Image (cartoon, helix red, strand yellow):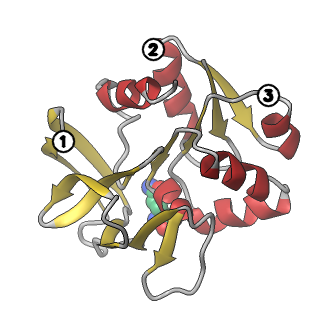
């Protein structure tokens, strides 16, 4: 299993470590040929800064190839900034990046006081999961009946699945619990 991990900025190494522990091979994506010359089974869009990542995706000419892989059904796991890259709308902002996930996300949605926090919450199919939020977004609105809500914290949606895309507002790669990464790997046919 070859997983392409977007590695232009942000928390990609933690995803790689977790996926390698689960037996997957990770390819760091830094330029277009990393995508086009590897036959990737799945993609990871890590946390970081969505504005920077979105800009680099375009500057490094990776944007179209990533978008078309997702549209073709390649499984993608997106965390935090990655969720913002996928979203079809960003609240109070006209920017759209990949736009493949029909939701509106709100960036830096928890304000300064609660900029970063850890809390244990239910995740659909898994039970309790410890969730680390770092200047996180949440899903303000789902825009299709096919968007499945996987987790909510204080009535805010923090995890969704839509077809081949899983998007999380939190960082499952920072702890020891690899159950979400396991679900993701099972999505590979
Ligand atoms: N605040 C970041 C953004 O808006 C996301 C933070 C994260 O990925 N941990 O892109």
- Toward the viewer: 103 or 146? 146
Q: Residue 106: horizontal and vertical position, in percent?
A: 38, 75
Q: Residue 70: horizontal and vertical position, in percent?
A: 61, 48
Cα–Cα gap, marks 3 and 2:
20 Å
Q: Which residue is mark 2?
A: 22
Q: Is residue 134 left or right of residue 38?
A: left
Which comes before the other along the chain, label 3 or label 2? 2
Q: Are marks 1 and 3 in contact (CB under 8 Å)?
A: no
> Residue 124 appears in which quarter of the rendering?
top left
Q: In what element is the residue under mark 1?
A: loop
Say if 144 sits above or below 6 in the image: below
Q: Around disc 1, counting alpha carbons within 10 Å, would you say few (fewer than 14), some (14 to 19), or many (20 or more)?
A: some
Q: Identify the residue at horizontal 45%, vertical 88% (top origin).
A: 92
Say if 55 sits above or below 41 in the image: below
- Toward the viewer: 87 or 144? 144
Q: Which residue is mark 1?
A: 124
Which comes before the other along the chain, label 1 or label 3? 3
Q: Are marks 3 and 2 in contact (CB under 8 Å)?
A: no
Q: Nearer the viewer, mark 3 or mark 2?
A: 3
Which comes before the other along the chain, label 2 or label 1? 2
Q: Which residue is mark 3?
A: 38
């Amino acid at each position: 299993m070859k997983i392409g991990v977007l590695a232009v900025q942000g928390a990609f190494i933690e995803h790689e470590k977790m996926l390698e522990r689960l037996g997957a091979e990770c390819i760091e994506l830094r330029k277009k040929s990393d995508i086009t010359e590897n036959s990737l089974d799945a993609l990871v869009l890590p946390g970081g800064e969505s504005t920077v990542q979105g800009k680099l995706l375009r500057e490094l000419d990776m944007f179209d190839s990533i978008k078309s892989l997702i549209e073709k059904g390649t499984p993608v796991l997106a965390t935090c900034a990655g969720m913002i890259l996928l979203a079809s709308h960003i609240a109070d902002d006209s920017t759209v990046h990949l736009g493949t996930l029909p939701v509106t996300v709100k960036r830096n949605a928890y304000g300064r006081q609660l900029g970063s926090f850890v809390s244990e919450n239910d995740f659909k199919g898994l039970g309790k999961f410890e969730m680390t939020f770092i200047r996180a977004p949440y899903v303000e609105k789902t825009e299709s009946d096919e968007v499945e809500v996987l987790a909510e914290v204080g009535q805010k949606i923090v995890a969704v699945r839509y077809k081949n895309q899983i998007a999380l507002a939190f960082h499952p790669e920072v702890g020891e619990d690899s159950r979400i990464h396991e679900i993701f790997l099972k999505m590979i046919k």
